[in-house]
Each structure stands twice: as C-alpha cells, then as structure tokens.
Image (cartoon, rainbow, N blue to C red):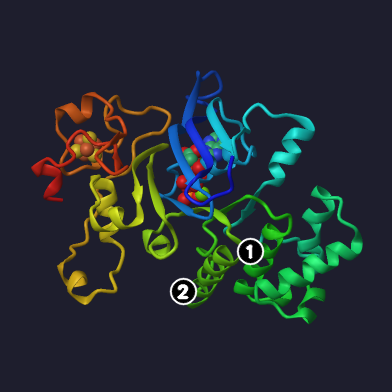
Amino acid sequence: MADTPNTPLLTVDKLGVRFAVKRGGGWGKRAFLYAVDDVSFTVNRGETLAIVGESGSGKTTAALAVARLTAAYTGSVKLDGQELLGLEGEELRQARNKVQFIFQDPYSSLNPRQRAEDIVREPLVSLTDKSGAEQQQIIDRLFAEVGLRPEQKRLFPHQFSGGQRQRIGIARALATQPQLIICDEPVSALDVAVQAQILNLLRDLQSELGLTYLFISHDLGVVQHMCDSIAVMYMGRIVEHTDRLSLFNNPLHPYTKALLSAVPSVDKKRRAETKRILIPGDPPDPVNLPPGCRFANRCPAATDVCRQSEPPLTDHGGYHRVACHLVNDSKTAAI
Ligand SMILES: Nc1ncnc2c1ncn2[C@@H]1O[C@H](COP(=O)(O)OP(=O)(O)OP(=O)(O)O)[C@@H](O)[C@H]1O
Ligand code: SF4
Ligand SMILES: [Mg+2]
C-alpha cells in the first residue's frame, strides 16, 4: 500500500468483543457482556480518530482488541493491509510492535524502580535488535523530542511531576517507531494546565513525525482540537461517526447532542445559546440489553419504533454515519 496521507492505516470491520459473565448465584447461567458490538471504523495515515463516550461504553476494550491485547470473537482488524486477528507467535510479536499505547495514568503505568531512560529503553530491548549505542542515541533524541532535559534520564518516576511522567510514557510509546499510537485518556489524570501542554506535545509530534493516533476520551472538550474525525460510542456500539467539524457543528444523534452540550464553548454567543442537556436515567444492563435502541430509555425523542428495533449505523451524506431511527425528524432536531 502506498504510504500517502488520506489512505487508511487502520481498518476495523464489524469488530466484536464479549466477556463471559455469571448471572444469578453459584449455579447461575453463563451470559455474555457484549463490550464491543459490530464496530467499524478507519484511521487514515497521519490523522487522529477520537473515540468518545461515557464510562463503560467499550472504548478501551475496542482499543485493546485492535492491539491484540484482548481477544475479539468476530470481525477484522487490518493494519497497513495486514489482518491482525488470527496472527500468532513471531508474526503477532512483530504486529504488536507496530501498535503502542499511551495510558491514562502515568503514575501506575511506569515501573517505580526503573530510571526514566531504562523505561524508554525497555521496548527497544524487548522488541528490536538495536545495539546499546543505537538504543542510547534513540533515547537521547526522544528525551529532547518530548521536552525532557538530558540530566533527567537518570531520575526515577517519583522524581517527576504528573505531566513529566506522561512525557516519559510518550517517549516510551515512540521508541520503536510504531505505525499506530493508541492514547487511552492520556490527559484525564492531569491538571487542566498540564493537559493543554501534553495535548500540544502530542499534536506537535504528530506533525513532525507523521504519527497516526487512535485517541480515546470520555470528554469531547479534550478532543475538540485534537482529532480529524470522531466516533461516539454508547453501550458497545458506534452511534455517530464523522469528521470533527460535522460532529461539532451538526451533531445528529441525541446522545452526541447531550455530550456536546456539556462542552464549554470558547465562543461567548454560542455559550449563551447552548443549553445543557442532562441525560436522565442510567444505561441499560449490558448483559441484558433491550431489543431496540440502546439509548431509548434515556432519549427524550424515543418512540415505539425505537424500543422495538435497533437502529443501524447509516450514512447520512458525506460520511456522516448515525444510528438513530429519527435522524432529521422534528423530535430529534428539537433536542
Ligand atoms: N475483562 C473484563 N471482563 C468482563 N467485563 C469487562 C472486562 N473488561 C471490560 N468489561 C466491561 O466491558 C464494558 C466496556 O468496558 P471498557 O473498559 O471498554 O469501557 P470504557 O469506555 O473504556 O470505560 P472508561 O471510560 O471507564 O474507561 C464495561 O461494561 C466493562 O465492565
Ligand atoms: S433511535 Fe430513537 S431512542 Fe434511539 S437515539 Fe434515535 S430517537 Fe432516540
Ligand atoms: Mg477506558
């Protein structure tokens, strides 16, 4: 495949991940929790796809399945044209090399007994054949790239601030020059001012190095300056998926509208006009999902058809995909 922008690096098709759970005491029947259900998306080279949704919607599970760190029971994950599901042994190790994670919590994801430079060195040792001198060169360059000083290489994680620790995590993720970087809530554990610094660093590294990101967040505010396209997940499914501007300027799914209403706008006029939509109630039991739309018990526009049949994810023009029976209906337009 030619290495040009706007061609998909990652293509995920009808991905499904389920967990066996026990229900009802010791002799309870085995049931499945469908954490990721029929999920399809692509991420273009050098671009960022954000996956957003509230806690438990399946964001992390989908990302872990892409990286082959949790098992998918169905679907396809193609990275640079290579099918990853089904790979084993050395081929799987090579493929894992091409995908790296930046985790939410820079406190617990770094080994407290390792010096910063050894944390960054670790993937070079376990995943590459680089010599000691080559490893040191890469480490020195990465420290400069993520904004850490050379003398900080010898320090331990507790000697860094939260933001600096996340910089170490970013350097570690970049070490093997992965094709895809999965950022799972990379700034949620940080102070707001530090969040902006880390987001800027990720953006700068992307333009310098041509990186491709899958960026997970529960907060649309965090991703609004960070992504090219957005997939909104609810209860294991994508409910809306389009480019960033369309999602922010013309959200079509009632759940997306509610999420967006919670994002403070920088535009004063817009801020005054936007009413905060509170989503009533709780999501349904993920092990015992209702027959129709999974959002129906919380949706102000729900009708009988919503409660009877599950809305498919369909394209409403210009690759604006929405899973709602009443897209463009006056009931949902009024939300
Ligand atoms: N190993 C597991 N065994 C059983 N259920 C699991 C497992 N991992 C995740 N789940 C369930 O799968 C669903 C999706 O979880 P997941 O962690 O992917 O959500 P998330 O969108 O990343 O949430 P958060 O924003 O809280 O990180 C949840 O209902 C969760 O309880
Ligand atoms: S299908 Fe019905 S219940 Fe579901 S989001 Fe659309 S209007 Fe609401
Ligand atoms: Mg998660």
- Quadrant of the drawing holding the N terminus: top right
Upstream in the sequence, badge 2 or badge 1?
1
Q: Type of residue at label 2? A: Val
Work out whether 296 lies above or below 230: above
Q: Which mark is residue 179?
A: none
State ligand 2's quadrant.
Answer: top left
Residue 141 point in image, percent of width and height: 74, 71
Work out whether 179 lies above or below 152: above
Residue 297 point in image, percent of width and height: 24, 37
Q: Is residue 145 left or right of residue 323?
A: right
Kindly identify the residue that appears in the image at 27 percent across and 45 percent down: 281
Residue 167 location, quadrant: bottom right
Kindly identify the residue that appears in the image at 43 percent across and 58 percent down: 227
The answer, for residue 259, to whether it is visible in the render is no
Q: Nearer the viewer, residue 225 or 184?
A: 225
Residue 147 point in image, percent of width and height: 65, 77
What's the distance in space between the residues labelled 2 and 1, CA to CA?
Answer: 15 Å
Work out whether 67 lies above or below 226: above
Q: Nearer the viewer, residue 293 or 231?
A: 231
Kindly identify the residue that appears in the image at 21 percent across and 42 percent down: 299
Q: Is residue 183 left or right of residue 158?
A: left
| Residue position for label 1 | 106
The answer, for residue 311, to whether it is visible in the render is yes
Q: Nearer the viewer, residue 161 or 245?
A: 245
Residue 56 location, quadrant: top left
| Residue position for label 2 | 192
Residue 290 point in image, percent of width and height: 31, 27
Classify mark 2 as within 8 Å of ligand 1 or not, answering yes or no. Answer: no
Kindly identify the residue that appears in the image at 38 percent across and 34 percent down: 285
Under circle 2, the secondary element is helix
Under circle 1, the secondary element is loop
Q: Type of residue at label 1? A: Pro
